[in-house]
Each structure stands twice: as structure tokens, then as C-alpha cells.
Image (cartoon, grey):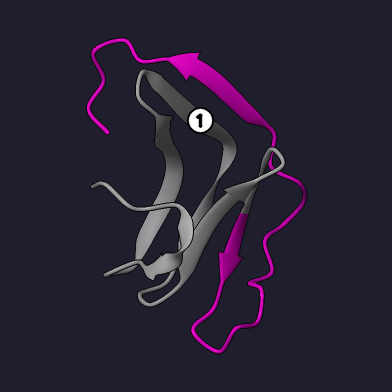
């Protein structure tokens, strides 16, 4: 499933986010997946993934997320 990690577009359904395409040709994998509820907004800033609830409050996610910026290798995102 493709999502927009722009901090504005709400996620359409509950999902377990383990990685996403950051830009053309690069895929970001998270060390630990993040549970994202329907209506949450996801953003990627300064090397970290933030999840914002529909109320505007940040979601509590356990620990920092170390991201791996890897070239795409024929994987679908």
C-alpha cells in the first residue's frame, strides 16, 4: 500500500508501517514497524518518522526509529 508521508494526508486504514518509498529510487526501512491507525498522518523529518493523531496530538511510538535509506531493488512499495 502506498501512503503519503507528508504529515497532511490521513492514512485510509489501520496498517503496520515497516517501510516506505521516500523519493524516487530510495526505500526507507524502519528497524521496528509502527502501528498507524486510520486517520493518522505520517511525516518524515530530520531522519525520524512522526505519527500525528487526528486530534493533532503526536502518537506515542516506542523509542527512536533508525532508518535505513536503501536503493530500491525491484521491491513494490
Q: Which residue lies furthest to the right in this view?
A: 63
Residue 62: where, in percent of width, then height?
A: 72, 57
Q: Residue at x 67, y 61 (%)?
A: 61
Q: To which residue does mark 1 refer?
A: 29
Whether 65 is drawn above or below 54: the answer is above
Instruction: Name the quadrant containing residue 69.
Output: top right
Q: How many marks can you see?
A: 1
> Is 72 a magenta residue?
yes
Rendered view: 76 above or below 55? above
From this view, report whether residue 28 is shown above or below residue 54: above
Question: Quick check: 21 left or right of 13?
Answer: right
- Determine the secondary structure under disc 1: strand
Magenta stretch contains residue 73: yes
The quarter of the image holding the C terminus is top left
Nearest the camera: 38 or 45?
45
Q: What stretch is highlighted in magenta?
A: 50-77
Q: Where is 48 relative to 6, above or below? A: above
The residue under the point 46% across, 41% down is 18
Disc 1 crowd, CA 10 A, few/some/many (<14, 14-19, 20+): some
Give the x, y percent position of residue 71. 43, 12
Residue 4, image x and y in percent?
36, 53
Amino acid at each position: 500500500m502506498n501512503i503519503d508521508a507528508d504529515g497532511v494526508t490521513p492514512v485510509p486504514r489501520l496498517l503496520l508501517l515497516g517501510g516506505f518509498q521516500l523519493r524516487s529510487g530510495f526505500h526507507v526501512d524502519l528497524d521496528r514497524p509502527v502501528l498507524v491507525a486510520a486517520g493518522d498522518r505520517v511525516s518524515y523529518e530530520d531522519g525520524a518518522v512522526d505519527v500525528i493523531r487526528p486530534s493533532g496530538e503526536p502518537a506515542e511510538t516506542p523509542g527512536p526509529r533508525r532508518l535505513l535509506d536503501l536503493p530500491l531493488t525491484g521491491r513494490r512499495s
